[in-house]
Image (cartoon, grey):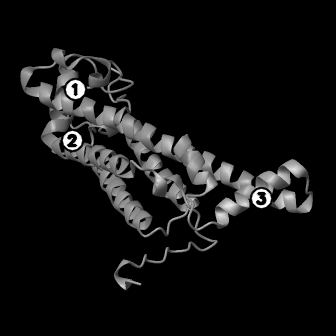
């Protein structure tokens, strides 16, 4: 027998390692590339909008049209020795710093999830936990990007003007910054839907997996013909090393 063609032994998962659909999807690499492209794109957009000049340009543009407070009025406060109102969060440096931090955090967790998935050492619950952390950050970023500006009582703004109006009303020099802000907000919404969908899929899979295990335990305690026959097939599929398993085949069919 030629030993050069001996098949390598398959790695047997421990009972504490739960297989998740992410490992068995044929198009896993496509989902990975899509998520990586979304994260890198939104980080680049946040870097473009990070300078203070970009925030100030959008703030002044909205003030000139009367959509929000005017930052130029703060000069009169200083000239008259009056304490100016606090800078709204949407126009502050904290907002852009948090958005950029959320993108970097999402990228780090993305790389962590992929490394763990390649090592087949991540459980469904851990995957849901990591995705929930990223979803929380993107939700907070979305709330911050549409935060109000009530610093001027005569010109209150429930959300930034570029989310309510077209960028065509802005001056030519500020239209690029307006498009960047709109694209950043739109990609944030897309990422929220992306992670929420994956969490829902994994939770449904975990529920289905628990129902199968419950069926196995129930058939052993209260055996009957139909349940025992079905659960016996499931148990044979789970114990077989040459099969993808009933759950994985069901997921592929779905």
Would you name the residue on which mark 3 appears?
A: 232
Q: Is residue 144 left or right of residue 46?
A: right
Determine contact: label 3, label 2, CB under 8 Å.
Answer: no
Tell me if mark 1 has few (under 14), some (14-19) or many (20+) residues whose alpha carbon lies within 10 angstroms of its own.
some
| Of pointers 3 and 2, the one earlier in the residue sequence | 2
Disc nearest the viewer among 3 and 2: 3
Residue located 39% across and 24% down the image: 158
Residue 188 in picture, x, y percent from top left: 35, 38
Of 99 and 218, which appears nearest the observer? 218
Q: Does residue 219 appear to the left or right of 32 in the view shown?
A: right
* Picture residue at 37% right of the left edge, 28% below the top: 150
Residue at image coords 32%, 32%: 186
Tell me the CA gap for discs 2 and 1.
Answer: 25 Å
119 versus 218 height, above or below? below
The residue furthest left is: 173
Q: CA distance from mark 3 to mark 2?
A: 54 Å
Q: Distance from label 1 to label 3 (Cα)?
A: 72 Å
Asked whether 56 or 117 is in front, the reply is 117
- Asked whether 140 or 11 is in front, the reply is 11
| Residue topped by disc 1 | 70
Q: Secondary structure at mark 1?
A: loop
**Mark 2 or 1, nearer chain start:** 2
Q: Dot 2 lies on which element?
A: helix
Q: What number of labels is visible?
A: 3
Residue under label 2, please give it: 45
């Amino acid at each position: 027998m030629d030993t050069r063609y001996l098949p390598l032994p398959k790695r047997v998962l421990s009972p504490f390692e739960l297989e998740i659909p992410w490992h068995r999807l044929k198009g896993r690499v496509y989902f990975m590339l899509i998520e990586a492209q979304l994260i890198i794109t939104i980080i680049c957009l946040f870097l473009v909008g990070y300078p203070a000049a970009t925030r100030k340009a959008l703030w002044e543009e909205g003030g000139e049209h009367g959509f929000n407070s005017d930052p130029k009025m703060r000069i009169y406060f200083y000239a008259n020795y009056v304490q100016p109102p606090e800078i709204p969060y949407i126009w502050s440096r904290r907002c852009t710093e948090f958005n950029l931090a959320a993108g970097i955090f999402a990228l780090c967790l993305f790389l962590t999830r992929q490394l763990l998935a390649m090592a087949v050492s991540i459980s469904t619950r851990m995957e849901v936990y990591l995705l929930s952390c990223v979803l929380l950050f993107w939700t907070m970023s979305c709330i911050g990007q549409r935060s109000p500006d009530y610093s001027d009582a005569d010109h209150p703004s429930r959300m930034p003007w570029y989310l309510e109006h077209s960028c065509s009303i802005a001056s030519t020099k500020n239209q690029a910054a307006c498009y960047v802000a709109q694209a950043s907000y739109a990609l944030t919404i897309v990422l929220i839907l992306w992670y929420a969908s994956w969490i829902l899929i994994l939770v449904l899979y975990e529920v289905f997996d628990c129902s199968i295990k419950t069926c196995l335990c129930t058939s052993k305690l209260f055996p009957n013909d139909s349940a025992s026959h079905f659960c016996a097939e499931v148990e044979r599929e789970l114990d077989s090393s040459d099969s993808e398993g009933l759950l994985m085949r069901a997921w592929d069919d779905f």
